[in-house]
Image (cartoon, rainbow, N blue to C red):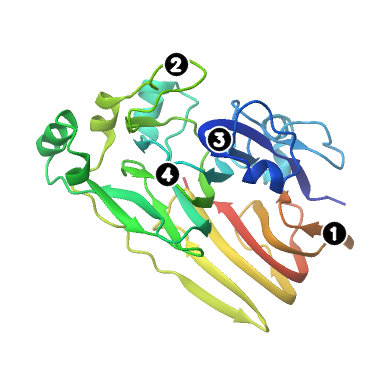
Amino acid sequence: MTEPLFLKSVFQEKIWGGRKLAEAFDYDLPDGDIGECWAISAHPHGPSTIENGPLKGLTLDQAWAQHRNYFGDAKGEVFPLLTKILDAEASLSVQVHPDDAYAAAHEGPTELGKTECWYILDAEPGAYLIYGHHAKTKAELTAMIEAGKWDDLLRKVPVKTGDFFYVPSGTIHALNKGIMALETQQSSDTTYRLYDYDRVDAKTGEKRELHLKQSIDTTIVPHQDPVLNIQTEHVGDSTITTYVQPPMSPFFSVYQWLVKGDLHFDRTTAPYTLVSVVDGEGELIADGQTYPIHKNMHFVLPFDIKSWDLKGDMQIIASEPGNK
C-alpha cells in the first residue's frame, strides 16, 4: 500500500509579510513577519518534510532523489514544481523571472526558470496587481526604467478573491498590499527585482538589491496577456475547474476541486499530483485507507495511487507536472 505524502511546510520571513500565515498555521512567529509558506517544496532553500509512512522524516528533495518510483520514475535532476501561499501585508517588489535557459546560464545548471500562476485566496477591496507593462520596444523599456517612470511603465490590474492569473517567465509582475494567493510555480527561487519602492530593510538598514540588467534582459516586450481557456465541469454538487494545462502551460496543470459531498478521481497520464486544501474539511480515501484532511494541509499523491475519493465540503487547489 502506498500512502499520500503529507508534508510539513516551511515558512519564510519577508519584508512585505504579515501575521496571517503564522496565525493560520498556528506557527510560532519569529522576529520577522511571515510572507511565504512553502507548502510543497523540494527546493534547497526550503524543502518540505514528509510526515508519514515509509518516507517519514525525508525531505521532498531527498524522496525525489532516493525514491523516484513514488513519482513514476519521472525524469529530471530536480523536482519540478513548488506550491506556495503568499501573504502580501505590503506590496512585493516589482519583479520578473527568467526562463529555463537564462536561469541555467546565469544562476547555475540546476536552477530552473520560473513560470508561475496565482489563485487569489483573498483580496481586500481595491486591491490590484502589477501585471505587465506598457513599453513597446526594449529601448523604450530601458529608457522608462532608467528614468524611473513607473506610473507610465507598469500595468495595474484590479483583483478580487477567486481570480486566477498565469504569469509566464519574462512577465513583469507583483502582488500588492492586501492580497493572499496560492502560487503554483516551477521550482525556482530566482527573482530579478526591478523596483522596490525605495524601501529600507529593517535588518540591514539598506535598500534591497535591484537587478536592472537581468530584468531588462528577461522581460518580454511587448507584453501580451496569455489567453486562458478555463473550463469547469460539474460532477454532482461538486465542480472541477481546469485553469491551465499543456500545451498552453508546458510546466504544469492547475485545477480547483470544489468538493460538495463525494468526488472520485482516476489517475490519467500525470505521474503524481500535488494537493493543497485551502478551505473546509473532509476525507481522502486512497488504497482503501481513509485520511482526515482540512484547511492548510498539503500533500502529494504518488504514482502508485491510481484512484482516490474526496468526501466533505472543501476547496482544493491541485497541480500536476507538465510536459517539460
Residue under pointer 4:
115
Residue under pointer 2:
205
Mark closest to the chain's N terminus, 3 or 1: 3
Secondary structure beneath label 3? loop
Secondary structure beneath label 2? loop
In whole angstroms, how far apart are the C-alphas of marks 1 and 2? Answer: 46 Å
Q: Amino acid at mark 1?
A: Pro
- The structure residue drawn at horizontal position 42% and vertical position 46%, both measured from the top left corner, is 175
Residue under pointer 1:
292
Quadrant of the image occupied by residue 229? bottom left
- From this viewpoint, is residue 53 visible? yes
Mark closest to the chain's N terminus, 3 or 4: 3
User: Of circles 1 and 2, which is in front?
Assistant: 2
Mark closest to the chain's N terminus, 4 or 1: 4
- The structure residue drawn at horizontal position 70% and vertical position 39%, both measured from the top left corner, is 9
Query: Above or below — where is 173 with respect to 285?
Result: above
In whole angstroms, how far apart are the C-alphas of marks 2 and 3? Answer: 40 Å
User: Of circles 3 and 1, which is in front?
Assistant: 1
Residue 312: image x %, image y %? Answer: 78, 71
Number of marks in the rendered image: 4
Residue under pointer 3:
76
- The structure residue drawn at horizontal position 53% and vertical position 51%, both measured from the top left corner, is 180
Q: Amino acid at mark 4?
A: Thr
User: Of circles 2 and 4, which is in front?
Assistant: 2
